[in-house]
Amino acid sequence: MNDYEKLVSITKNKHTLSNEFLEIVKKMQEDVSQENFESIEAHLIKRQEIIDSVNLLDKQFLTLFEALKKNDDFEQSIINYPELKEYISDIKANFELSYDIDEKIMPIIRDEIAITQKEIKKIKTQEKVVDKYSQDVMKKITGANFGVFIDEMK
């Protein structure tokens, strides 16, 4: 496999990942529209894994591309690989569509996270109040304090 074929292979892998990324974003959009927020975290984790893989492929691509670009026959040789241009065009389209969908759903997801955080804070506050008042009520009923007092004076 020559360097140009390696470049195509890297781009093909990135194309596959961009398709997977777009599918995940579409699933997220569907989940948000159905107010099914339970699976969002799993989608976000998978998206991050894809992003990490794409970043690695980008580094490999750039290193190889920069090396090939130094060749005198680069422009003539790259023409022999038209699928490279097609893959890059598809990748760009996939990520642009993903971005457009993200622009719509991410504010909704952030709002849902904020609501959930407020509910958690409210529940924690209620637990503290219940804990405090339940001890006070038990103290009134039994006339006893449930704590332990240690007198160290002798």
Image (cartoon, grey):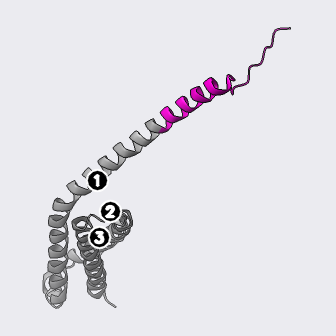
The residue indicated by pointer 3 is 58
Residue 112, label in figure: 1
Mark 3, residues whose alpha carbon is within 10 Å: few (<14), some, or many (≥20)? some
Estimate the spatial distance between the alpha carbons at disc 1 and disc 3, rounded to whole Å. 33 Å
Element marked by disc 2: loop
Distance (Cα) linking label 2 and label 3: 31 Å
Residue 37 visible in image = yes
Decide which of tag 1 and tag 3 comes sooner along the chain: 3
Name the residue type under label 1.
Answer: Glu
Query: Does any portion of residue 72 appear in the rendered image?
Result: no
Dot 2 surroundings within 10 Å: few (below 14), some, or many (20 or more)? some
Tell me: 65 left or right of 86. right
In this view, 80 is above or below 141: below
Q: Is residue 56 left or right of residue 12?
A: right
Give the residue at mark 2: 37
Where in the figure is residue 123, as x and y percent of width and height?
A: 43, 42
Give the residue displayed 32% in from the left and 51% down from the top: 113
Q: Alpha-carbon distance for marks 2 and 1?
A: 8 Å
Q: Position of residue 62 (x, y in %)?
A: 27, 70
Look at the image and tell me in which quarter the N terminus lies: bottom left
Three-letter amino acid code of the residue under disc 2: Phe
Of 43 and 128, nearer the camera is 128
Instruction: Write down the region rendered in magenta.
Output: 127-154
